[in-house]
């Protein structure tokens, strides 16, 4: 189940390279052109984001090239960093120490080991069934009932978002799609590319013509105009990539559209959690991007839906 | 090599964000004093220091805990170069005498080039709240007035490795180094200790 860099994938990665070069030049030029302090601050932030994109794209490409096991390890690390940020801002009590220790050191590695082993049956129910019962029981045994319902829910949701959902990304590599053997890395590319492009385009469309906020109490930056413009453009880009996937153009469009909408939903949900906890960013991992969770919020929610749709309709 | 491994492990587990509000390097000897909530505390401060500072700093630690078994003893002596002191005092010694002996011991351990890491609360807090400071910091400041007293705030350590647990949870933490204090001429013990404690608390409020 290796995933060599086939010519199609190389072309896709080449496209990213060109996009990044263009973005860097444009960002540098705009940064020199703008005059007002506010615009200069915006451009400094945009340029920091572009630099971080270089790092992320580089790591992603190198991992895809390195193959199946490395991809799983990379997303295992992403999952670890995300869960670490989630637990840091979660309202836990000393009674959660042991359930959380199990989550970090047993559940997380086990989930990714199941991806590696290709054991779909257990992979898909480990966290929703067995772990959700186990961590609650372990917390009960710690004997602290204060805010128990809330704390049990927090642990469970942290594991769902940061471990279960993230593990669906490398799980794409294990799907057996007739006529697409050995090319699954392109599915991973398709998902990550569409979800990130949709994010960026929603931001751009929102800045350009955004008026009506989607949910003004949660995120002033997310607007209906941004959502529609961003998702439609990302859908168009996803459709244009149909040749690299096992999908027809119409199927590619439908999936890219779903990915875009799920990504937006993920962004809103993770923002709502931040609002609730009174934090601006989950961490400070990447300059301009906040923490790992700030970066992968949309990917987290698009991955499981894309994975299961692809598995249901296309895999054997 | 052990030092590098330990500092790497600290970063992976607790990912400390380090913030300096004073110069990280100084020609003066320093006493870093911090709030105390976990056994990781001094390692976290130690790992946050620049390599030069790391070589010269000596944590002040409880002898009973660090000499308890061989690995800890080795770490304390060879890696961290700790100054081990006895907490409390023997029944036949008066508290004043014990405090004087400990102060002399720590001052001796500082020599003319080492810095210290010190937890003036004397014990770990369960809730992360910062308790009253014991007198040790005052005696040291009086005995070595030229030394810079640097307040350090440790954030979230009480959740990473609470009292009574042995396995640290991977969570984000922060280490904030504040501007140095000195003992003012004629300052009362209690006033000084309250000022020092307030400095550590304030660093956390701004975080």
Image: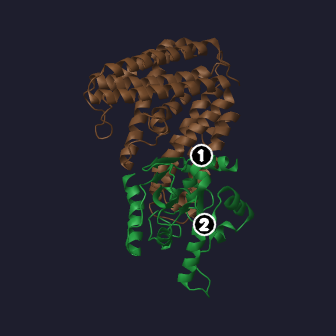
SS label for mark 1? helix
Residue A70 shows which numbered tag?
Answer: none
Q: Which chain is brown?
A: A
Label 2 neighbour load within 10 Å: few <14, some 14-19, many 20+: many
* Residue at the disc numbered 2: B61
Farthest-out residue, right: B70
A236 vs B206: above or below: above
Q: Quadrant of the C terminus of chain A?
A: top right
SS label for mark 2? strand
Q: Position of residue B76 (x, y in %)?
A: 67, 61
From the viewer's perspective, is A312 left or right of B68? left
**Residue A237 visible in the snapshot:** yes
**Alpha-carbon span between mark 2 and mark 1:** 24 Å
From the viewer's perspective, is A128 left or right of B181? right
Label 1 neighbour load within 10 Å: few <14, some 14-19, many 20+: some
Q: Quadrant of the N terminus of chain A?
A: top right
Q: Position of residue A252 (x, y in %)?
A: 50, 17
**Residue A258 visible in the snapshot:** no
* Residue at the disc numbered 1: B12
Query: What chain does badge 1 belong to?
Result: B
A118 vs B53: above or below: above
Q: Are marks 2 and 1 on the same chain?
A: yes
* Residue B179 picture quarter: bottom left
Q: Which chain is green?
A: B
Q: Nearer the viewer, mark 2 or mark 1?
A: 2
């Amino acid at each position: 189940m290796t995933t060599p860099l086939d010519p199609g994938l190389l072309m896709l990665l080449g496209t990213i390279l060109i996009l990044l070069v263009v973005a860097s030049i444009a960002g540098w030029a705009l940064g020199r052109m703008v005059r007002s302090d506010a615009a200069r601050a915006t451009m400094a932030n945009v340029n920091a984001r572009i630099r971080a994109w270089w790092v992320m794209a580089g790591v992603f490409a190198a991992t895809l090239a390195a193959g199946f096991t490395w991809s799983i390890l990379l997303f295992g690390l992403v999952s670890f960093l995300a869960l670490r940020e989630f637990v840091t801002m979660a309202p836990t009590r000393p009674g959660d120490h042991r359930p959380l220790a199990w989550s970090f050191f047993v559940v997380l590695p086990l989930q990714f080991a199941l991806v590696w082993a290709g054991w779909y049956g257990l992979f898909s129910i480990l966290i929703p069934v067995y772990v959700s019962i186990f961590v609650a029981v372990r917390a009960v045994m710690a004997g602290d009932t204060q805010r128990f319902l809330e704390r049990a829910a927090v642990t469970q949701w942290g594991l769902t978002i940061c471990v279960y959902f993230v593990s669906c990304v490398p799980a794409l590599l294990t799907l057996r799609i007739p006529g697409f053997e050995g090319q699954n890395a392109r599915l991973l590319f398709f998902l990550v590319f569409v979800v990130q492009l949709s994010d960026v385009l929603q931001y751009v469309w929102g800045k350009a013509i955004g008026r009506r906020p989607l949910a003004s109490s949660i995120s002033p930056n997310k607007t209906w105009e941004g959502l529609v413009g961003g998702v439609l453009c990302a859908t168009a880009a996803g459709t244009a990539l149909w040749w690299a996937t096992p999908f027809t153009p119409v199927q590619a469009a439908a999936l890219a559209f779903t990915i875009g909408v799920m990504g937006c939903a993920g962004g809103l949900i993770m923002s709502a959690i931040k609002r609730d906890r009174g934090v601006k960013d989950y961490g400070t991992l990447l300059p301009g991007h906040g923490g790992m969770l700030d970066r992968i919020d949309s990917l987290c929610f698009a991955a499981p839906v894309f994975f299961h749709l692809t598995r249901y309709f296309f895999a054997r | 090599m052990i030092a590098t491994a330990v500092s790497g492990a600290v970063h992976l587990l607790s990912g400390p964000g380090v913030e300096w509000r004073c110069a990280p390097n100084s020609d003066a000897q320093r006493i870093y004093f911090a709030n105390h909530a976990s056994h990781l505390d001094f390692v976290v401060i130690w790992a946050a220091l620049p390599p030069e500072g790391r070589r010269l700093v000596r944590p002040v630690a409880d002898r009973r805990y660090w000499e308890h078994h061989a690995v800890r003893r080795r770490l304390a002596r060879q890696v961290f170069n700790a100054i081990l002191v006895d907490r409390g005092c023997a029944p036949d010694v008066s508290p004043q005498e014990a405090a004087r002996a400990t102060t002399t011991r720590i001052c001796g351990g500082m020599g003319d080039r080492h810095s210290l890491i010190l937890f003036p609360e004397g014990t770990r807090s369960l809730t992360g709240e910062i308790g009253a400071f014991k007198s040790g910091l005052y005696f040291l400041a009086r005995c070595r007035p030229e030394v810079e007293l640097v307040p350090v705030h440790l954030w979230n350590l009480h959740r990473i490795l609470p009292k009574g647990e042995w396995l640290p949870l991977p969570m984000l933490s922060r280490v904030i180094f504040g501007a140095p204090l000195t003992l003012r001429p004629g300052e009362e013990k209690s006033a000084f200790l309250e000022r020092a404690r307030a400095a550590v608390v304030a660093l956390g409020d701004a975080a």
